[in-house]
């Protein structure tokens, strides 16, 4: 039984999700103590509880402490089964994070799987659907598994009620990923989602980015959603390079001018561009898990160049090492970092 301190480092829900994912992949039981102890409301929230329930369902696991507010969780996985699954969060909690809890196990299961998820699809505290579809999953496909996702209905905070689906074609092995430069810029796209709010908000956001960058009007798209369950606004900037696509999303907030929302999003884009690295802060965090699993199995792992690692990523590395026999090296270089993930017995 592996014991994980849920208050360590970043001390949030990622420790729960990564521990569940790794327990499913390795078949090891885990106890998570002091769940989300660093948060204003510690313990399992609805989104985390749905992730636990999803992990239970795909493996017929035995679990203790699976209830709202619980600060201790004991999870004993069974055999992972491919199949058709549906999960409803019931709040604006992130559908993408629930998916990523069970995806590592299902992407090496014996057979294809389909998953339906209802909840938040564009949440300020989680990877937006667009990031998952355009940035993360294409890189995962280079390792072997094929995951196709579809956005059926956007769901914004606080109403939620968005819907996405995923079809997973597993791979028996995970390959290696090397991503040290991003290559030539092939394209850029700004997409603004606007739901049950005046269209001029989206127009002002596009105008702010266009005036600051000089990008052609063909780069901009406004998607006005008439039948959304609640109001919402998201500004997504997609940069397509030869070797990687990065996605940055900003979210409208009550009382914050559209111009400020757009400029804050653009600031993150420009910071990434100035750093001249292929992998942004959030994508770096997402890549650690599949690279770690591949390295543990002796078939994969990899190396990538990124911005200085966040506390989120550093905490993630500590959790990985509790479950996997891997070596993770972080070398600071030119204002960023080179991250290498290899099996523990690999020597450079």
Image (cartoon, grey):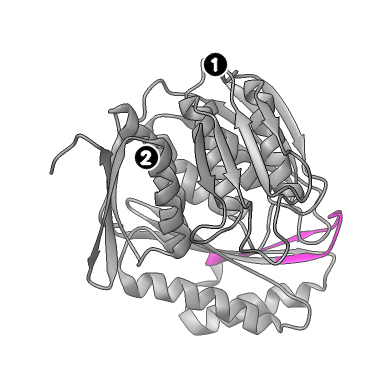
When the figure is inspected, residue 147 is found, relative to residue 32, above or below; the finding is above
Question: Mark on residue 3?
Answer: none
- The residue lying at 41 percent from left, 50 percent from top is 318
Label 1: how many Cα within 10 Å (few below 14, some 14–19, many 20+): some
Q: Quick one: SS at disc 2?
A: helix
Residue carrying label 1: 111
- Comparing 116 with 203, the one in front is 116
Give percent across and percent down for residue 115. 67, 31
Please identify the quadrant where the C terminus is shown. top left
Question: Mark on residue 292?
Answer: 2
* Residue that sits furthest to the left in the current view: 348
Q: Is 227 one of the magenta-colored residues? A: yes
Residue span colored magenta: 219-233
Horizontal arrangement in the rendering, residue 63 relative to residue 284 (left or right)? right
Label 2: how many Cα within 10 Å (few below 14, some 14–19, many 20+): many
- The residue lying at 76 percent from left, 59 percent from top is 156
Give percent across and percent down for residue 80. 57, 20
The tag earlier along the polypeptide, 1 or 2, is 1
Give percent across and percent down for residue 319. 45, 46
- Comparing 327 with 164, the one in front is 327
Q: Is 113 one of the magenta-colored residues? A: no
Horizontal arrangement in the rendering, residue 25 relative to residue 56 (left or right)? left
Which marked residue is nearer to the observer: mark 1 or mark 2?
Answer: 2
Horizontal arrangement in the rendering, residue 336 relative to residue 32 (left or right)? left
When the figure is inspected, residue 230 is found, relative to residue 27, above or below; the finding is below
- The residue lying at 74 percent from left, 76 percent from top is 201
Give percent across and percent down for residue 47. 72, 48
- The residue lying at 32 percent from left, 35 percent from top is 325
């Amino acid at each position: 039984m592996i014991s994980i301190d849920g208050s360590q480092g970043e001390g949030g829900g990622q420790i729960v999700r990564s521990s569940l994912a790794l327990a499913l992949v390795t078949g090891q039981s885990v106890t998570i103590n002091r769940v989300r102890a660093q948060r204003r409301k510690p313990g399992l929230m609805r989104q985390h509880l749905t992730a636990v329930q999803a992990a239970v369902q795909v493996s017929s696991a035995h679990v203790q402490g699976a209830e709202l507010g619980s600060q201790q969780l004991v999870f004993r996985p069974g055999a992972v089964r491919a199949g058709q699954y549906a999960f409803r969060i019931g709040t604006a909690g992130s559908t993408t994070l629930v998916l990523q809890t069970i995806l590592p196990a299902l992407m090496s299961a014996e057979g294809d799987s389909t998953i339906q998820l209802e909840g938040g699809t564009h949440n300020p505290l989680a990877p937006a659907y667009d990031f998952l579809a355009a940035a993360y999953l294409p890189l995962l496909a280079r390792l072997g598994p094929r995951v196709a996702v579809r956005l059926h209905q956007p769901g914004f905070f606080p109403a939620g009620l968005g819907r996405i689906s995923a079809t997973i074609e597993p791979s028996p092995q995970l390959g290696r990923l090397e991503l040290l430069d991003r290559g030539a810029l092939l394209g850029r796209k700004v997409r603004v989602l606007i739901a049950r709010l005046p269209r001029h908000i989206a127009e002002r956001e596009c105008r702010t980015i266009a005036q600051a960058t000089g990008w052609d009007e063909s780069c901009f798209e406004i998607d006005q959603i008439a039948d959304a369950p609640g109001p919402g606004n998201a500004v997504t900037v997609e940069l397509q390079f030869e070797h990687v696509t990065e996605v940055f999303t900003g979210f409208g907030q009550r009382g914050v001018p559209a111009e400020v929302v757009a400029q804050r999003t653009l600031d993150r884009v420009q910071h990434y561009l100035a750093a001249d690295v292929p992998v942004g802060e959030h994508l770096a965090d997402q890549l650690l898990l599949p690279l770690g699993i591949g390295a543990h199995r002796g078939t994969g792992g990899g190396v990538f160049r990124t911005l200085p690692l966040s506390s989120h990523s550093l905490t993630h590395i500590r959790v990985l090492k509790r479950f996997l026999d891997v070596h993770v090296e972080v070398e600071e270089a030119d204002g960023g970092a080179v991250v290498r993930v290899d099996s523990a017995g690999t020597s450079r």
